[in-house]
Image (cartoon, rainbow, N blue to C red):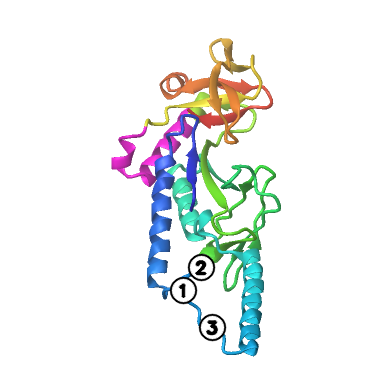
Amino acid sequence: MPSVSVFTPARHVATLMLTLLMMSAHTSQAQTQASAPASTPANAPVSTPASTSASSSASAAETAAEELQSVEVKAVRDPAIMPYKVAYELMSKVRAASKDKVQIQIRITSAKTHAPVPNLSIYLDGKNTRQQLEISATGFVNVPLDQAAYADGAEFVTNQKKGSMEVNILLLPKLPQDVFKYADISESIEAAQMAIKELVPWYFRVFMPSVNSIGICYAGQNQTVLVKGNEEQQLPANSDATDPLKNKVHCARFAAKDVAKEKGNLIMPATGWQAIYM
């Protein structure tokens, strides 16, 4: 896995969590390599052909090997995506720990350009599994929680070379679509804290600021968020942050300590908003 990160505006929430996954994947890969027979070094001496016929045979063998490699590139089991087993268990743990109040999203981009990979195809492939995954134009992959595929030992198969992609794991608040309460904000913050507590060892958590607020964010400036409680007020979206696509956004920030006081207050954001942890 060449690069793995988890999104929060201050970059803190789950970078370490996915670092653990990266360490786990690298350990697994190292064990696999250790158990595999050693390959012949690229610069190993080659004996001089005994005849023109032998030389032609060697050339034909090399050509055949190159053709085989070009076929294999079209269906690469690439650990850059992380094993499906790891993705399945990660998503299951987040869903259980957060009581399904936190979204976990997986975005795949080019390791070189950090942009979405053109013409990317990803399948779940196993003895009894063959399932193509949906990929958005911005690189988000719809990874299913498929128990049958998990039991089948299915792996991600791509049409890209190994090491050419990077994975970003995003934790985002899961809120009602149009109108929601301070209580929803409070529960989503608590859910994220529980998910991190479940996934990140305490000795890493001590270095991480806790998730303690949610931003209702817009791409444009001068936006406000309508809140209705004992009185009606327009909260300015004047806290700058970064969205999952690393674009600058402007947010109305709702802190856990504030929303806990008036959990019945209604939040009615204008269209075009997105929620992020802050």
> Which numbered mark, 1 or 2, is in the foreground of this view?
1
Q: Which residue is mark 2?
A: 153
The residue segment tinted magenta is: 186-208
> Is 45 rendered above or below residue 277?
below
Q: Nearer the viewer, residue 96 or 34?
A: 34
Q: Which residue is mark 3?
A: 48
Disc 3 to disc 1, C-alpha distance: 13 Å
Q: Residue furthest left?
A: 203
> Is 117 rendered above or below residue 29?
above
**Residue 197 shown in magenta:** yes
Q: Is residue 183 visible?
A: no
Which residue type does callout 3 highlight? Answer: Thr
The first of marks 1 and 2 along the sequence is 1
Which residue type does callout 1 highlight? Answer: Ala
Q: Which residue is mark 1?
A: 44
Q: Nearer the viewer, residue 181 or 27?
A: 27
Quarter-of-image position of residue 221? top right
Number of numbered discs: 3
Which residue type does callout 2 highlight? Answer: Gly
> Is 7 rendered above or below residue 2?
above
Residue count near mark 1 (Cα–Cα under 10 Å), binned few <14, some 14–19, many ≥20: few
